[in-house]
Amino acid sequence: MATHLAPRPLRVAIIGSGPAGVYAADILTKSQEVAGGDVQVSIDLFESQPAPYGLIRYGVAPDHPRIKGIMNALHKVLDRGDIRFFGNVTYGRDLTLADLRTFYDAIIFATGATKDAVLNLPGIELDGSYGGADFVSWYDGHPDVSREWPLHAKEIAVIGNGNVALDVARVLSKHADDLLTTEIPSNVYAGLLESPVTDVHVFGRRGPAQVKFTPLELRELSHSRDVDIVLYEEDFDFDEASDKAIKSNNQIKTMVNTLTNWLVEQGDEGEEKRDPASRRLHLHFLHTPVEIIGTDGQVSGIRFERNELDGTGNARGTGEFIDYPVQAVYRAVGYLGSELPEIDFDARRGVIPNDGGRVLDAHGAQVPGLYATGWIKRGPVGLIGHTKGDALETIGCLLEDRIDLPVAARPNEAEVVELLESRGVKFTTWDGWNKLDAHEKHLGESYVPAAGVDVVRERIKVVDRDEMVDISRK
């Protein structure tokens, strides 16, 4: 294996500019401190979209209050000028693995997980059955999805008890005008404005103490105007494992207390409630989906088996089945990574096989110079904060290997730019993102709301890829 101890900087390409990619780049730029001062690095960050930030721009509900803070942190890293950004460049199409090996000593894949996890359920193919990740891409203005979304259902089921399920349910149940303060694109606002929805049902397989969302996500549900949260007393089952979890985990305790308080308040209102909301968001627990029911090829209902807890916090069926009339079903049971050209892939887990971030081949041997970080490394688990520690592990492995990395034949920084230009790739840059960023903010400032709507918009997201590229490359 070739080695180099040349004085030139270590050349590293990172594929993906979401939190995983940016954190890896940030840690690597500080590698002088990590590796005792003997490492200089030159980093290029490649992103398939014209804009940076990955999941933060295209995978998180726009009404999250913490998004802006995370995006600002990522912006500060990329705005320093020591990391080059290339947007609108797709790995496997615009640049191959052979290309990257020519220009870089090491390559880090940080492509995340963007597809819906598979849910094998009779009727899943019916019209009106949707993937939660696809819906998220639509309302976040992803340039590669349709501008239209079929919002015709009055009653909707959301399968899943994680943060994505709550995001999907909240956006579906929220009034469109209440999302105008966010960056939602114009086509998304127009679609949600026409939605006839009255009831959104969220179903989880286990009990309130086993939910996978976080306290912040849960509390955000109660902030939606003219949306009642509906809970069911028969769903509140706590076994020995639940009691232990509540006592030992403050997050679980907080969520159970919040849900229980809502249930009590709901009961106290009783018949005295005078002004019911026009929309309802129902939270169901102890339900396992059995079948999506269809009529003439269209979703018309969903069947569940009632569960009970078995003492360990797991659920088992009771043999009791319940049908709910719905006209749409959204599955939000997790994300799955996508296979990358020329890289071995674990299709079951949706990850690149790796050992601590070192990419492995089909035989379990390390592939020199290739690394992975983020969800494509470990699967779609954990919050964004976990990505920092994950990136630190991967970068640590890369630095340990640096003496034995393959030597890039053409490490000159200008040559990759020349190759992209020779292939006619309309790549965007960090300066281009700043132009697009300013343009989107200007659209928000210039927004004229409809009569009777009092709103100030910070930004309106541009959706069309060509338009994004044109603005960035002016």
Image: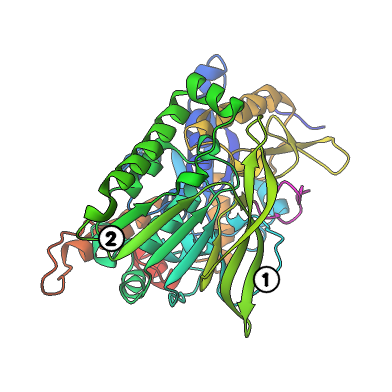
For label 1, the residue is: 123
Image quarter where the C terminus lies is: bottom left
What percent of the width, then of the height, locates residue 144?
51, 68
Label ID, residue 90 = none
Q: Residue furthest bottom?
A: 296
Q: Is residue 423 magenta-colored?
A: no
The relative height of residue 397 versus residue 271 in the rendered view (above or below) is above
Could you tell me how far apart the alpha carbons at marks 2 and 1 are, in whole angstroms?
Answer: 32 Å
For label 2, the residue is: 179
Q: Is residue 8 visible?
A: no
Q: Is residue 294 left or right of residue 406?
A: left
**Residue in the picture at 26% in, 57% down:** 438
Q: Is residue 348 magenta-colored?
A: yes
Q: Amino acid at mark 1?
A: Gly
**Residue in the picture at 32% in, 53% down:** 434
Q: Amino acid at mark 2?
A: Leu
Image quarter where the N terminus lies is: top right
Q: Quadrant of residue 5?
A: top right
The relative height of residue 250 versus residue 169 in the rendered view (above or below) is above
Q: Which circle, 2 or 1, is nearer the viewer?
A: 1
Secondary structure, mark 1, is loop
The relative height of residue 296 versus residue 239 in the rendered view (above or below) is below
Q: How many marks?
A: 2
Q: Which residues are drawn in magenta? A: 337-349
**Residue in the picture at 50% in, 17% down:** 33
Most prominent secondary structure in the magenta stretch? loop
